[in-house]
Image (spheres, coloured by chain):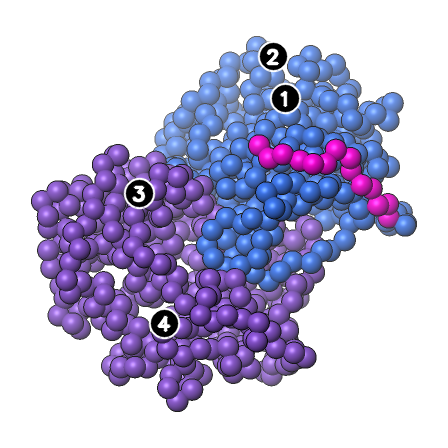
Chain colours: A purple, B blue
């Protein structure tokens, strides 16, 4: 854990707001940002004075380590506004912990809790008008850290920049998605960085996903790289399978992200009396279950999408489509979780934190 | 292959040169850059007008894809100045091909050959005073491409920046290195991006390498992630083993970089009458050979280091040190290759290209 000399955030306000130009009814995920951002630099072995300032491009040296050696991590979080205009975060402590786990794996300095949490809260307070109510609206929050040190020697940077961006959001996916089960490409190695929210993990998925797109599939379900027999993640989400009335999902590992939506859904499903089995799920049992009709649902789980229903999957050139189901676990759990996040229902789990 | 509208490079010269401030006798690898850089942007589906301009920081949007999803690739090359003050590149066609292979794997646009090669040559001509002669001097060349498109949706960028930086260099490693054979951590997955010079591959190595450093080892020899029984790469280099009088190195694969120094050394060794065996090399046979005395040499091969002698290795907490050897293949091949690169000896392979 790095020390910090700072305990107060400097705030420089934008002279005008861009909010009047934003069509909140027609937002695309991740391309509109609020008026301000939070920034804190790490140099000389410690975190410098944090600042909230107008969202704007910043200068980078062409030899910055992030460009050459990819030291970059991020988190995805959401904030919600309730009917009293209070803003709520969902399990921010989990994002904070995972952010610093990612930092450690990528040989980057940990961000002090005070900087992460206070930065987040004060930024949300300043741009609170941008946090919309109702209809699946939320504020997507993107904390990230990049290596800003100069020089092309292949070793960890000595300077970093931690930032938080805010992007108003509706739903991430529209409609149901078809997925391709990976038979050759992989997301993560044993002993690799698959459990970290490292930037490079995502770029690695674009090419195989593009190939899947060309075949009419929106996402890839990743399998273990050594045998391609175990189902691991779906695109940028964790993945759940319902066989008869049991909900299956892979255990987290070095290869699989410890998703906060994933762990929340597991806990919520159990509290609903759903049988949840966290264990390696084989491609062969998925295919068998699809064939014999016991496969009822597949869905992805992540912060951006919350729950994303998967309509069908392809494996070894055979496409298996799900039969639409009433009272699906996906819709039941999505409704319960989003109601909890939006403070429409009571938070029996203590997951929501007021800003 | 992307099209380009451009056929002429705009050149903006620096008003003064920084060269007088550089101590060429005491260079550290990768922290001094020349007066100019080459830049070409990709947007609206095509490469824009290329430019050579003074080396300087540039503006990036905080939501640039390279920061969040790690689309970033690079190459490492060297130029040498001969006694007639001519500048020579070493197999630049190989770097160009590999750069575009990396681009494809990372869902980035290919750079046209004209932009890559003309950019390289004109930049070297402009900063030719920085290319020093003799004593292992060279100009390290760093072409790289980053995703500059804005927005935190997890898909490939629609805008990119291709740049070339020049950094005057001496030798990369000083002295001999001790290495740790990876028993848990890995560099690359089957079906992953290990064969690409993708930025994220390097950041992934920093943490395991830091752990090895703490135990007194300078580098890690990576093994296959599934079984940790096969020797793959050493740090950021390919790796060769001499058992009796046979030189062994792993075949290239999805997990192993197709190193240009590696393939040059293989060809050169064969032409010297050395028996070269390109096949998977097992950790068990290395340990056995170290025990029975048949292991004569280990060395890394890469552009930055050319050849880097490995003094000893540790596996399962046992350290095996090499007995110093006369007429080593490492020194023989390094001398032949650097003489060829520096135009001290004849280039029978046709690998050197005049700028």
Q: Is residue A73 visible?
A: no
Label 3 SS: strand
Q: Which residue is mark 2?
A: B272
Q: Which residue is mark 1?
A: B333
Label 3 in the same subunit as label 1: no
Question: Which mark is drawn over residue A180?
Answer: 3
Q: Which residues are magenta?
A: B1-14
Label 3 in the same subunit as label 4: yes
Q: Are marks 4 and 1 in contact (CB under 8 Å)?
A: no
Provide the major secondary structure of the magenta segment.
loop
Tell me: residue B195, above or below residue B60.
above
Q: CA distance from mark 2 to mark 1?
A: 9 Å
Label 4 SS: loop
Q: CA distance from mark 3 to mark 1?
A: 47 Å
| Residue A339 within the magenta-colored segment of the rendering | no
Which quadrant does the N terminus of chain B fall into?
top right
Question: Which mark is drawn over residue A259?
Answer: none
Q: Are marks 2 and 1 in contact (CB under 8 Å)?
A: yes
């Amino acid at each position: 854990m790095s020390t910090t000399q700072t305990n107060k955030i400097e705030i420089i306000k934008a002279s005008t707001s861009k909010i009047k130009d934003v069509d909140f009814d027609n937002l695309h995920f991740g391309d509109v940002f609020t008026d301000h951002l939070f920034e804190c630099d790490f140099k000389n072995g410690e975190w410098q004075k944090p600042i909230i300032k107008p969202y704007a491009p910043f200068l980078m040296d062409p030899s910055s380590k992030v460009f050459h050696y990819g030291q970059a991590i991020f988190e995805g979080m959401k904030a919600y506004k309730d009917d009293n205009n209070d803003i709520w975060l969902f399990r921010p402590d989990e994002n904070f912990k995972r952010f610093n786990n990612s930092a450690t794996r990528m040989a980057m300095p940990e961000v002090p809790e005070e900087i992460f949490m206070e930065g987040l809260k004060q930024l949300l307070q300043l741009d609170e008008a941008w946090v919309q109510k109702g209809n699946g609206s939320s504020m997507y929050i993107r904390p990230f850290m990049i290596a800003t040190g100069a020089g092309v020697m292949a070793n960890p940077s000595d300077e970093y920049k931690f930032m938080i961006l805010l992007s108003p959001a509706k739903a991430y996916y529209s409609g149901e998605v078809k997925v391709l089960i990976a038979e050759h490409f992989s997301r993560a190695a044993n002993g690799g960085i698959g459990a970290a929210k490292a930037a490079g993990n995502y770029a690695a998925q674009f090419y195989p996903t593009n190939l899947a797109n060309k075949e009419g599939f929106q996402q890839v379900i990743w399998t273990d790289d050594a045998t391609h027999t175990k189902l691991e993640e779906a695109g940028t989400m964790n993945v759940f399978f319902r066989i008869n009335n049991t909900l299956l999902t892979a255990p987290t590992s070095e290869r699989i992200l410890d998703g906060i939506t994933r762990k929340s859904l597991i806990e919520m499903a159990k509290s609903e009396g759903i049988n949840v089995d966290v264990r390696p799920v084989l491609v062969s049992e998925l295919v068998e279950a699809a064939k014999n009709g016991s496969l009822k649902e597949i869905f992805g789980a992540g912060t951006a999408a919350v729950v994303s229903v998967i309509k069908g999957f392809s494996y070894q050139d055979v496409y298996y489509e799900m039969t639409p189901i009433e009272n699906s676990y996906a819709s039941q759990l999505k409704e319960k979780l989003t109601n909890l996040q939006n403070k429409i229902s009571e938070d029996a789990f203590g997951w929501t934190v007021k800003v």
